[in-house]
Image (tube, rainbow, N blue to C red):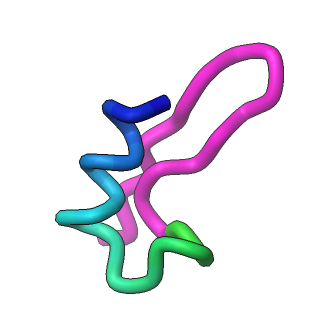
Amino acid sequence: DNFILTFRKYFEPDQKNPVYFHSIRGVGYKFTDIH
């Protein structure tokens, strides 16, 4: 999804190993706060 890719571009330190935005198959996406 282009919307999530845009968020990952700005917020994720490493886009190939996401920390904040996770894809959940069959459901969508999940935001995880690491604090």
Q: How many labels does the image show?
A: 0
Locate the C terminus and report the quarter of the image it occupies. bottom left
Residue 16's quadrant in the figure? bottom right
Left or right position of 1 against 25? left
Residue furthest to the front: 2
Residue furthest to the right: 25
Q: Where is residue 9 in the image (x, y as percent from the top left)?
A: 28, 64
Q: Residue at x 34, y 71 (%)?
A: 12
**Is residue 9 found inside the magenta-colored segment of the image?**
no
Question: Which region shows up in magenta?
Answer: 19-35
**Is residue 29 found inside the magenta-colored segment of the image?**
yes
Q: Which residue is drawn at 26% across and 49% down?
A: 7
Q: Position of residue 17 (x, y in %)?
A: 60, 76
Residue furthest to the top: 27
Left or right position of 33 against 26? left
Q: Position of residue 3 (x, y in %)?
A: 32, 32
Q: Residue at x 61, y 22 (%)?
A: 28
Which is nearer the eye, 5 or 33? 5
Residue furthest to the left: 10
Q: Position of residue 10 (x, y in %)?
A: 18, 64
Residue 25's quadrant in the figure? top right
Q: Which residue is drawn at 58% across and 48% down?
A: 22
